[in-house]
Amino acid sequence: MASILETAMLICFGLSWPINLVKNIKAKTAKATSLNFLLLITFGYVCGIAAKFVSHQINYVLIAYFLNLAVVLANLVVYFINRSYDKKTS
C-alpha cells in the first residue's frame, strides 16, 4: 500500500513538470525560472531514487522517480537555453 501511495504522490507532482516544460519552451526566457528551485527538486528526486536502492525496495515506484527526474532535467536544459536567449537580447 505504501508503494501505491508513494507512486500516486509522484504522479501528482510529476504531472506539473511537463506543463512547466512546455511553458518554459514557449516563453524563451529564464527570467521567471528559479535555478535553485530546479536544482533542489533534482536533488530531492536523486535522494528518493538513492533511498530506494539503499533500502533494497527496488520496485515499480522507481519508474515514477526516473520519469519525474528526466522531465526536471529537461527543464534544467531549457533553463540554460532560455538564459542564453536572455543574454543575447539584453
Image (tube, grey):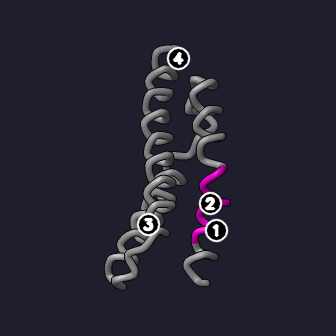
The N terminus: image quadrant: bottom right
x and y percentages locating residue 81 in the rendered image: 44, 27
Kind of residue at badge 1: Met
Q: Which residue is mark 2?
A: 11
Cα–Cα span, label 4 and label 2: 38 Å
Label 3: which secondary element: helix
Q: What residue sits 65% from the left and 32% below the top? A: 23
**Residue picked out by circle 4:** 90
Q: How far apart are the two marked residues, 3 and 4, measured between alpha carbons?
A: 42 Å
Query: Who's the residue at 50% across and 41% down the image?
Result: 75
Instruction: State the image quarter where residue 48 is shown.
Output: bottom left
Label 3 is placed on what type of residue? Leu
List x then y, in percent, for residue 44.
47, 66
Q: Earlier in the sequence, mark 1 or mark 4?
A: 1
- Find residue 3 and report its image quarter: bottom right
Q: Are marks 4 and 2 in contact (CB under 8 Å)?
A: no
The reply to whether the magenta stretch includes residue 38 is no
Q: Residue at x 43, y 57 (%)?
A: 66
Residue 50 image-quadrant placement: bottom left
Q: Amino acid at mark 4?
A: Ser
Q: Which disc is residue 9 wearing?
A: 1
Q: CA distance from mark 2 to mark 1?
A: 5 Å
Q: Pinpoint residue 78: horizontal percent, then vertical percent.
A: 48, 33
Note whether 2 is above or below 50 in the view shown: below
Residue 27 against residue 17 in the figure, above or below = above
Magenta stretch mostly in which secondary structure? helix
Residue bounds of the magenta highlight: 7-15
Give the number of callouts: 4
Tell me, for residue 62, which label it has, or none.
Answer: 3
Q: CA distance from mark 1 to mark 4?
A: 40 Å
